[in-house]
């Protein structure tokens, strides 16, 4: 489920002080950033069991919008210039952390049951990955890594790409130790789902028309690398968190390194239903079966 | 009479404007390939005829930008279904080669794929049935779309080049090539074939289907100093690649996935992931005897799995007093000020290139691979912005070079 951050409420006193200061800053720059919003969002750090495409279950963690565990992270979307105030509640029984990649001085630790406050804003279109930086990469790998999309339009879509070696999830959940040099994932997901279920996620499945300007915010929050290939269309790279020299390139295949995010612009010039998938074709599998991995379709009508 | 003439002219014009490229391919599943250790491995592939094993990579599909391309695809492969996906060519859904969204081709059936060649560049084709398995089995090949005029340039109005080298990277896991893996069942009623995919542990790392000694014996760049060498890099494997050019080649990355880059990148290292293509120009003013290194990385762990080498041998063109087909080479005025006129006589029509370098070896100007008719020829070079000093103009027919000096006042 997509969860767009709601407008600021006044429930949290500590938060209200911070956001008042932020509001003043925003007011000063009002002429430059029209109608910038202050947005509250509470993230519940939950642990639970994720269902894989074949019904297999594995230990998983996620930043959810309620205290009820869901196997996908909250998708945060803001306009350029908005200020996002995050309250992160640690619902787990161990210490966790919170950081936004690329934001200096933000990270903090959160004890079990505690809440920590964070403020984020960006003056440019882009994509940021929020994640648990403690015991990296284990906590982030277990699911604690999501996307903040900045500069969304009416046709924005979000792909949070992950991979899992399911036995490792169960091992890490009980304090086990893994050797990342032996990593061989068996499940590959976008927003917590695999083919064919990804197409049922309206925040992931691109549906549009000829000439539309479609923005795709995609991030690799897994531990494998991926190479996302579009059938039918080339896209322009508007933003990359790592491969900044690639900005402006028009391509059909996009390498995604670990913890890398892209913003792509797609302007379809033909109708049809076309696949998008990882061209490391090992990732189009789920539980060792093709084609139950990282594969969805785009529908242009 | 006029109407008939106009009709004939229109027909001829239409044929000229919309050139047609016809391709014939046969899908096979009982191919054999000799790998670097001398063993024979079973492969799937696309063959040009029934009498030969399918080559890996499959035959090159080549067309000019704007051409209509028609692929007549026959499937002669027992129980297996296949398709042709035209990777990166942005064809319409019906020709996209994804079985559930277009069509697949059963044993002893055939299908047509049609597309109009879009942007000049480097592309791929491959089977999209059980693609994780069928690609590894060998069902992939290159597509090169040349500029509209078919010239040796990267794209319409792009960079001219003298030599062209395709480096097509992949890997082989020989366990996957056993009958028990390759002979999977096909369910006509299913949207997809559901296939068990074994763990991938490639044991041969290939360029143009060749590894190790096979590669050393077969694939190399042999060129001349000051020639522009264009590399088409393609990765269709399941590893990421890092292609490292010798520094003396002055590599410049100019295009990717069939589109020019907005900004060229001067770098001797190109990272290329599965499904990507890159175009790289490389040129050396001095002889080079070295290798291009291709590194293969496991995409799950980032671990380097292998390195393959492509020999590079760049030599100085044979300096001769005269080219046999070119007489009376003259430079005037010499010394020059604003314009240098180069005149010569060609006995036969020929492809001639010239370069101007400063006396200290800096490349000032190059014009490559232009076709001239026989007879007296003239080239004018604007020297108004040249610094005062001595220059050398070299004229080549591709194998030999004749040089003359001139002075800019």
Image (cartoon, rainbow, N blue to C red):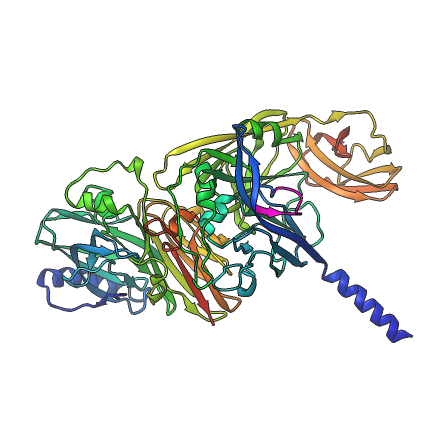
- Residue B202 left/right relative to B168: left
Placement of A274 over or under B34, stated as above or below:
below
Placement of B122 over or under B289, stated as above or below:
below
Count of numbered tags: 0
Could you tell me if residue A248 is visible in this image? no
Q: Position of residue B321 (x, y in %)?
A: 82, 25
- Residue A10 left/right relative to B243: left
Q: Position of residue A117 (x, y in %)?
A: 15, 55
Q: Position of residue B151 (x, y in %)?
A: 71, 48
Q: Give the camera-side residue of A261 and B346.
A: A261
Q: Give the camera-side residue of A191 and A5.
A: A191
Q: Give the camera-side residue of A227 and A18.
A: A227
Judge whether residue A179 is colored magenta. no
Placement of A216 over or under B122, stated as above or below:
below
Magenta region, mostly helix, strand or loop? loop
Q: Quadrant of the N terminus of chain B?
A: bottom right
- Residue A273 left/right relative to B143: left
> Residue drawn 57% across and 56% down?
B107
Q: Which residues are magenta?
A: B45-53
Q: Quadrant of the C terminus of chain B?
A: top right
Q: Give the camera-side residue of B82 and A207.
A: B82
Q: Position of residue B119 (x, y in %)?
A: 60, 55
> Residue drawn 47% across and 46% down?
B182
Placement of B187 over or under B238, stated as above or below:
below
Could you tell me if residue A179 is visible in this image? yes
């Amino acid at each position: 489920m997509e969860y767009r951050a709601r407008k600021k409420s006044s429930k949290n006193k500590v938060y209200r002080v911070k956001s008042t200061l932020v509001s003043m800053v925003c007011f000063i720059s009002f002429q430059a950033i029209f109608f910038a919003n202050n947005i509250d969002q509470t993230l519940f750090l939950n642990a639970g069991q994720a269902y894989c495409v074949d019904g297999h279950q594995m230990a998983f963690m996620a930043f959810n919008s309620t205290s009820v565990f869901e196997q996908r992270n909250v998708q945060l979307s803001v306009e350029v210039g908005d200020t996002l105030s995050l309250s992160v509640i640690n619902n787990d029984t161990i210490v966790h952390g919170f950081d936004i990649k690329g934001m200096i001085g933000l990270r903090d630790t959160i004890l079990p049951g505690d809440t920590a406050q964070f403020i984020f804003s960006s003056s440019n279109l882009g994509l940021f990955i929020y994640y648990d930086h403690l015991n990296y990469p284990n906590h982030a790998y277990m699911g604690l890594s999501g996307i903040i999309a900045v500069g969304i339009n009416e046709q924005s879509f979000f792909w949070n790409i992950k991979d899992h070696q399911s036995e490792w999830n169960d091992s890490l959940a009980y304090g086990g130790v893994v050797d990342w040099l032996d990593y061989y994932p068996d499940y590959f997901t976008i927003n917590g789902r695999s083919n064919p279920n990804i197409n049922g996620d309206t925040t992931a499945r691109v549906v549009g028309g000829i000439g539309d300007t479609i923005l795709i915010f995609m991030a690799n929050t897994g531990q494998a690398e991926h190479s996302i290939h579009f059938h039918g269309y080339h896209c322009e790279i508007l933003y990359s968190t790592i491969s900044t020299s690639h900005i402006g390139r028009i391509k059909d295949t996009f390498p995604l390194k670990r913890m890398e995010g892209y913003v792509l612009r797609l302007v379809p010039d033909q109708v049809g239903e076309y696949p998008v998938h990882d061209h490391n074709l090992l990732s189009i599998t789920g539980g060792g079966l093709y084609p139950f991995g990282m594969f969805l379709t785009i529908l242009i009508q | 009479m006029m109407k008939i003439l106009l009709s004939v002219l229109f027909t001829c014009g239409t044929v000229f404007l919309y050139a047609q490229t016809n391709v014939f391919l046969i899908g096979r599943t009982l191919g054999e390939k000799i790998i670097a250790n001398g063993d024979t491995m079973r492969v799937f592939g696309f063959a040009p005829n029934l009498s030969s094993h399918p080559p890996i990579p499959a035959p090159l599909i080549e067309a000019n930008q704007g051409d209509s391309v028609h692929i007549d695809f026959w499937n002669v492969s027992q129980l297996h279904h296949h398709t042709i996906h035209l990777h990166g060519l942005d064809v319409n859904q019906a020709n996209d080669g994804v079985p559930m969204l277009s069509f697949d081709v059963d044993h002893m059936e055939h299908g047509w794929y049609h597309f109009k060649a879009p942007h000049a560049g480097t592309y791929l084709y491959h089977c999209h049935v059980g693609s994780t398995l069928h690609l590894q089995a060998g069902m992939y090949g290159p597509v090169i779309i040349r500029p509209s005029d078919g010239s040796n340039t990267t794209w319409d109005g792009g960079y001219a080049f003298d030599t062209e080298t395709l480096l097509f990277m992949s890997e082989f896991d020989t366990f996957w090539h056993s009958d028990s893996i390759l002979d999977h069942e096909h369910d006509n009623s299913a949207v997809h074939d559901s296939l068990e995919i074994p763990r991938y542990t490639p044991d041969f790392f290939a360029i143009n289907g060749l590894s190790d000694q096979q590669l050393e014996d077969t694939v190399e760049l042999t060129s001349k100093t000051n020639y522009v060498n264009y590399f088409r890099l393609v990765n269709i494997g399941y590893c990421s690649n890092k292609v490292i050019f010798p520094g003396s080649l002055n590599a410049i990355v100019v295009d990717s996935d069939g589109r020019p880059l907005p900004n060229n990148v001067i770098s001797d290292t190109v990272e290329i992931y599965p499904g990507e293509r890159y175009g790289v120009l490389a040129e050396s003013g001095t002889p080079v005897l070295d290798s291009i290194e291709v590194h293969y990385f496991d995409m799950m762990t980032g671990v380097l799995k292998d390195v393959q080498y492509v020999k590079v041998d760049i030599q100085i063109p044979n300096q001769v007093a005269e080219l046999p087909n070119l007489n009376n080479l003259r430079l005037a005025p010499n010394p020059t000020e604003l314009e240098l006129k180069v005149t010569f006589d060609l006995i036969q029509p020929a492809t001639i290139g010239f370069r101007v370098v400063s006396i200290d070896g800096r490349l000032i100007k190059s014009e490559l691979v232009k076709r001239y008719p026989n007879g007296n020829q003239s080239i004018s070079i604007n020297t108004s912005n040249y610094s005062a000093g001595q220059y050398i103009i070299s004229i080549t027919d591709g194998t030999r070079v004749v040089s003359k000096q001139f002075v800019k006042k």
